[in-house]
Structure formats: C-alpha cells, structure tokens
Image (cartoon, helix red, strand yellow):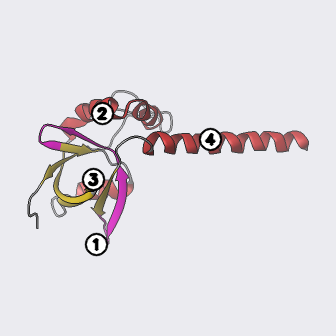
Amino acid sequence: MKRVVIVAAIVVGVCVSYVLAHLALIEVGREVVVIYEPTPTGGVRKARLWIVDEGPYSWIHPGNANARWWVQHMDANPIVEIYRHGETQRYRATPDPQAHAKVHRLLREKYGVADRWVRFLEGSDTRAGIINGEKCKTVPIRLELVANAP
C-alpha cells in the first residue's frame, strides 16, 4: 500500500511539474497579447496568445475550437481588438495559410525554447507533435492595424 501511495505521489508531482513548466514557458518573460475573438453565439471570448511581427503585419496562431470557427467566419468578423503594450487597438484579421512556415519561423525566433516546447507537444509546420501525432493544422491569422475601424 505504501508503494502505491509513493507511486501515485510521484505521478501527481510529475503532472503538476509539467503543467507549471508549460505555463511558465508560455507566459513568463515573453509577450502575450489578449485578443477579443467573436464567438458563434455573438459574444466575445478573451484569448491569450503569442504574437509575431514582420513588416507592416502581425500574426497570431490560434488553435482552439472557437478560433477555428472564427477563421471559417472571418469575412463576417474581420475586425478584432487586441490588448498589447498597455493599450487596446483594432486590427483587420485575415486567414493567411501561405504564411504558415514563416509564422512558425518567427515564433521560433521570438519565443525560443518556449515555442520549441509547444511545437514538440502540438506539432509544427514540418513535424508531428507527440500529443496528437499530427503536424500543425492551425491557420495563421494576419493582422493589419486599422485606424478608425468600424
């Protein structure tokens, strides 16, 4: 019985350590923005995401079910608000599947080991992740800052 308790404690400890390490790699010391995504019910969902920039554009790489719905309905919901650098600004969002490799490269450059960890788990444009055994299928979203967006 004592061995079972010890093994269970070790398993729980490893799981808690994994979760804490994952959160620390994603959140600590790197830029994380808050994006306000439209939802199927007409509401707004706050999502914390990494963001990368190149030239006049920024990109996000959302991966949850709401983001997939949003990408499919982006023509009707192209304007999003993003809280970044202490202020909220409006952006025109456009799916940009051709930028997939570039966005992964920019994420690796900006987020370093944290991005490598996430891609190891979830997959990248070139390798399958260990969680689902597939390459990344998320569509990058190109963001263009808009002045006076409706």
Who comes first in sequence, dot 2 or dot 1? 1
Whether label 2 touches label 3, CB < 8 Å? no
Marks 4, 3: nearer the viewer: 3
Give SS at disc 3.
strand
Left or right: where 84 falls relative to 23: left
Residue type, label 1: Gly
* Residue under pointer 3: 84
* Residue under pointer 1: 42
Question: Would you say residue 45 sits in the magenta stretch?
Answer: yes
Who comes first in sequence, dot 3 or dot 1? 1
Q: How many marks?
A: 4
Q: Residues within 10 Å of mark 4 (few under 14, many from 20)?
A: few
Q: CA distance from mark 4 to mark 2?
A: 26 Å
Q: CA distance from mark 4 to mark 3?
A: 29 Å
Q: Residues within 10 Å of mark 2 (few under 14, many from 20)?
A: many
Q: Residues within 10 Å of mark 3 (few under 14, many from 20)?
A: some
Marks 4, 2: nearer the viewer: 4
Residue 17, numbered circle: 4
Magenta residue span: 38-57
Residue 104, numbered circle: 2
Question: Would you say residue 96 sits in the magenta stretch?
Answer: no
Q: Position of residue 125 (x, y in %)?
A: 32, 31
Who comes first in sequence, dot 4 or dot 2? 4
Q: For the view shown, which residue lies furthest in the right direction?
A: 1
Look at the picture and state if 137 lies above or below 35: above
Q: Residue at x 35, y 61 (%)?
A: 46
Give SS at disc 1.
loop
Q: Residues within 10 Å of mark 1 (few under 14, many from 20)?
A: few
Q: CA distance from mark 1 to mark 4?
A: 37 Å
Residue type, label 2: His
Residue type, label 3: Arg
